[in-house]
Amino acid sequence: MRNLTEEEGLKGLGAYWIIIEKLALLPEPRAQLEYLRPFCSSKKISFAYLTKIILEYQLFKLEEDGYFSAEELNPVKKREKKAAENDGKSTDSKPKNDEKQQKTSGNDAENQPENAAKSLENNKSAKQTPDSFKENIKDIITSSAKEKETAADHDVNFPIVRHGSLTVCDGSGRPQPALQPVCPWQELVDELAERTPWLEAVCMQSDYGTLLMRHIKEAVECFKQHIKIYDKWHDLLTQSDARRYFVNYTKTGQTSQALRTTLLALDAKQQSAAPPDPHRYEQLVNGRRTYLGCPIPDDAPPRPDATAFWNETTHSWCSPNATPKRPKRHT
């Protein structure tokens, strides 16, 4: 409990007692992890966080059949040790107790009729105990069912899974198809790079739409690093969670600015590495090559620079910036 409080604070302590409270609603204080899921929406705490408290702090005992139960905070060995110490003390005080018993024997004889009457009443209450215990069990089961109905009201479409019987029911108790296992958060994030109408809408809503679309794979990798740094992967359980978080990541001021700077640097690096366009000094007008409004023959090579002009006589480009060729010397 000390480790739990130091690591998680009061939030972890409250989560622990929420789990204990829900286990106490059951006839037997043991359950599977999925039993806690319907209560998460009403308590405004994530199912992943409750699972963390159960698995990481040795406060719960995991059984082979998939069930868990609470470890006892005061183990039996400590109680036996205290009981042994108490027995030692009782042996020392035995002579004194004998004297007291002799003094009180007379009083006990006087009070014997009253004690007999009380014992009869205790016997009657003992007979009533099984019946009252059954009534208490009924109350616990009824209250548990009411809590499940309340949780279902918050999320009607949320199914309740019972792994023991392999049946899945919705909030109204109707059978539903079995749930699929939760995908790793990395797979959910990787699916964001697929070209879908949702991705096109996200790019249009951002301030750098075409830039984001060109480098969507690199943007997703940056998003992964952001999730790891801020430890947000616990909250990504479905594709909707990953999409919602990615939209905020691309629109929030600080993260959006950092992502845009990274993508612009990638864009500039790709452009500098790409070979230059050989026709960069020409203009294409109605499908025809031109320069400064003059047409260029179809078989002409690309214009070499911005000052070159086409010589119809030599059928070649002439440029004042071109270095004259030196005549070859004959030896």
Image (tube, rainbow, N blue to C red):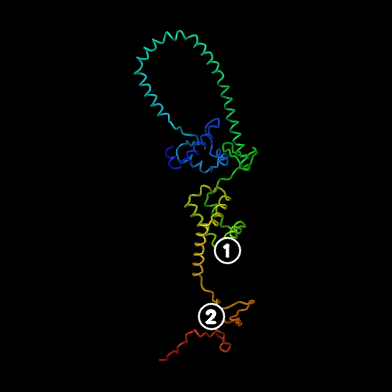
**Is label 2 in a helix, a strand or a loop?**
loop
Q: Position of residue 298 (x, y in %)?
A: 60, 81
Circle 1: residue type: Thr
The vertical placement of 101 against 206, above or below, is above
Residue drawn at (35%, 14%), measured in percent from left and top? Answer: 96
Quadrant assignment, res 95: top left
35 and 180: which is toward the camera: 35
Q: Which residue is mark 2?
A: 306
Residue 134 - label? none
Q: Position of residue 306 (x, y in %)?
A: 53, 80
23 and 182: which is toward the camera: 23
45 and 220: which is toward the camera: 45
Q: Which residue is mark 1?
A: 210
Question: Is there any visible trace of residue 78 in the rendered image?
Answer: yes
Circle 2: residue type: Ala
Mark 2 / mark 1, whichever is N-terminal: 1
Q: Position of residue 308 (x, y in %)?
A: 54, 83
Q: Quadrant of the N terminus?
A: top left
Quadrant assignment, res 138: top right
